[in-house]
Amino acid sequence: MSGAQRLISATDLVKEFPLRGTIFDAFSPKRRSVHAVDHVSFTIGEGEVLGLAGESGSGKSTTGRLLLRLIEPTSGVVEYRGRNVTSFSPREMESLRAKAQIVFQDPNSSLSPRMSVGQAITHPLQIHGVGTPSERRERVLDLMEKVGLSPAPFLYRKYPHQLSGGQSQRVVLARALVTQPDFLVADEPIAMADVSVRALILQLMRQLKQDMGLTYLFITHDLATAKYLCDRIAVMYLGRIVEIASRDDLFTRPHHPYTRSLLAAVPVPDPRARRDKKLPKGEIPSAIDPPSGCHFHPRCPFAVARCREARPPLREISAGHFSACILD
Amino acid sequence: MGTPQNPPTATAASFSPAGGIASALRWFSRSRRRYGMEWWIMVAGVVVIAAILTMTVFPRLFTRFDPNDQNAGGQMVAPGRAHIMGTDNLSRDVWARVVYGARTILGVAIAAALVSALIGIPLGLLSGFAGGVFDRVLSLIMDSVYSFPGLILAIAFAAMLGPGVVNITLAVAVVYIPTYFRLVRGQTLSIKEEVYVEAARAIGARRATILGRYVFPNVIATVVVVLSLNIADAIMTEAALSYIGLGLPAGIPDWGMDLSMGKKFLPSGMWWMITFPGLMIMLLALGFTMLGEGLAEILNPRLLER
Amino acid sequence: MPVTEKTILDVQDLSIAYPISIGVVKAVEGVSFTLDDGEALGVVGESGCGKSTMGLSLLKLQRPPGRVTGGRIMYRGTDILGMGDRNLLRLRGQKISMIFQNPLTSLNPLDTVEHHFLETIHFHDPGMPREKALAAVEKMMETLGIEKKRLKEYPHQLSGGMRQRIMIGLALIMNPDILIADEPTTSLDVIVEAGFTELLQGLRSLYKLSIILITHNLGLVAEIADRIAVMYAGRLMEVATTEDIFARPLHPYTQGLIACVPNIQADQKELVCMPGSPPDLVEPPRGCRFAPRCPKVMPICRQETPRLVEHAPGHSAACWLYGKRPS
């Protein structure tokens, strides 16, 4: 990825959440903490959709928030168009917020119950001092039509509890896009929506990406959805990226055993599909005391002694395809 | 999906007074069809309060007597045609004292409630939002005041400040500041964790804006209900203070004071001096309670946990 | 589906409604289906379609103010809806069991796992000696694939997947005929979900269970269910074998639902979407409830409600595209 095309880059991101234990823990040598994000690095090119896939505890949501500094990284660097975001002043952060936005999982809790649709979507414009009130209203109404909130003047006055799930998520999208950002972090945006609504939102996101020239970080636990929307996919496990590849490579030639298990486990809406029966044993371990070396080794059907010793680095398997597994 | 839910509260619509009243009235008329018992309780409360409010604003409509006129009629006359509530030991018309006394008690109670709200709410907001040492210290102070028996605290302040309407208002107000503080702080703490607050940060809002436009409007719903219940409580506290003899100078008609005066004559069978002011205190407090409870049930049945 | 000697559950014309402040929500209307011995029936639909409400009513568990307004639920010749409390207690957990979406809230945080099991056994079979009960519990833990030492732990010490396994264990410890599972995997991670599905298949053959699986997850029913019933806005739209539903869906709603789900093994260029949202159930539209959103709607669809009619062997659909007008 050449420097000119790179929109976002994350280098060695770390986030640890300290745990407040009992008084006795204060005397113990090791301060316990949740290792949510453990030295994560990746880049996102302009116009690309990077999928960040993983199960609970993988750190994907935290990573998304770190990119926008909604949570402060413990260490590591985030760059936006080559500039170091992690060292931005509050004022610089404020102008970044117009360019980089986020959409959360639950649209109903993402909207203040006391703000109307129009007020919610207009607020970012007010914060960044864009246009006059009437200009703002025009812009918001236009955007509402674009995301499928129609008729816009009617819905403009509605409150979140008067909207359906699909409509609420559209409002959240509109609010995120009203300042015409380049970059959007979508944190499981369809997980809480109904089955038929999910397809609509996915279609909409695809459309908007083309029309508005957006770049996405698409966080999801559902690889089937990632396959539909993403250009490249990074798979996370317990705070680390275990594999990162183009969509085609990941689905046709998955390398890391965890990725393979994940792919095998995804339910397929087709009765003829037969699942590869070998599932990793056990469950996801705690992020407070993760296994040594490769986090996945206790569950991995191919684990050898070396897997326990050191953290496997992300190595290039083939062009643009990286995997954190020492085996072949 | 597809079935409508609760209507928006009147306070949400806009912050301009005219807009607020207009939407409150609109909501009022629309709500009628929707609710059962809670509606009628609220309406009953509103009716009582409205009636007594009219008494305070247009006392002449209700009585031609002056409450301090010590020659209104005979002394200790039982309730009858000339004086519907009788006269007291100083030959003052009791009904007139009731009518004019409404001003005092209502004025003090509402003013006290407003003062404590105006102090307690912002402090609660800031404390809950800011957290840290500031929050800890302020909470400690507020909890200490709160744990004091309210009436004793009011008595202490009233005695300290001396007589006077303003002083008694302040004495009553102090008692309730922690109530608003704790309520608002608790709400703020939980709303602070809501996703929409994080979303507000994500769009670049400054902390003050988040507090004012995202946290405060969501907190205010509970406050409206508590205000009404608070006034009911303040009425009782004011009556108690003046019953003891603290706070108000002699010339001002007051139900609490009349209660204590009338107490002396009850054993001799002259019941009307104490009964009518007593009934009025109860009625007024009940009115605000019904308004508050009815409103609470309607706005959000899960709002108040008792 | 015709009632045969293999039928153990026969739901006839079930209707459930619940009043809200502005009217009555007709959550379930005229739902009829059968369940054969050893069969797994998937009830599929989106939120608000009434599938969970219907599931609860099968054990007369619907919460007031919701109430059954019509129909019968025949289990081995007796109408469950007509059963008294004592008989219902003997039915639930013993003959027909149910598991729910969130195992954390279904388990008592103050009781150990072992206590949960023993309490259940003791309730249904007070005479069983403790050693025998413990032996049964240990055997169940083995079947579930959980170490015995977990018996002494409390729900919060277990992972989500383990809790859901305990739930199934509790549901099956008395060897019921039917298991009703309401969104059992929705709260689970993907790999855990796969393990759970595997477990369910194993338990099904081990206990010769009949299963009613209520879910919106098409992948799950594709794997487990023999037959599928599709619900929309409180009514059944289509009932057929799993193979038929996926290969030859008749009802436009079923077709739309299948077409809009991302399939990891298929090469999908575009997801076909269904615009609109489910109708208001207080004043449902006249005629077919899917008509406002149906891409193949005809005039009759808005006037008369189509009945669930068999159009191919074992394949019924409630759609005017196939049925003749009733005389």
Image (cartoon, coloured by chain):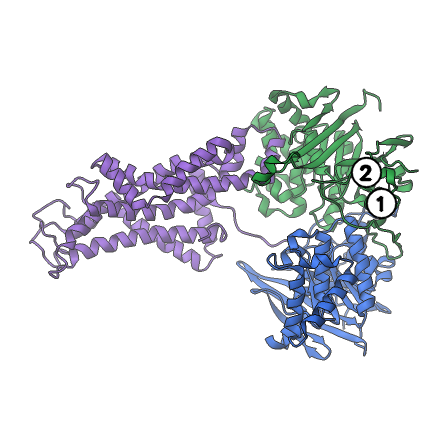
Chain colours: A green, B purple, C blue
Q: Chain of mark 2?
A: A
Q: Amino acid at mark 1?
A: Cys
Q: Chain of mark 1?
A: A
The quarter of the rendered structure image containing the C terminus of chain A is top right
x and y percentages locating residue A10 in the rendered image: 75, 27
Whether pointer 1 and pointer 2 mark residues with C-beta atoms closer than 8 Å, the reply is: yes
Q: CA distance from mark 1 to mark 2?
A: 10 Å
Q: Which residue is mark 2?
A: A294
Q: Residue at x 80, y 57 (%)?
A: C197
Q: Which mark is residue A300?
A: 1
Circle 2 SS class: loop
Q: Is residue B234 left or right of residue A181?
A: left
The quarter of the rendered structure image containing the N terminus of chain A is top right
Q: Amino acid at mark 2?
A: Cys
Q: How many marks?
A: 2
x and y percentages locating residue C139 in the rendered image: 76, 65
Earlier-in-chain disc, 1 versus 2: 2
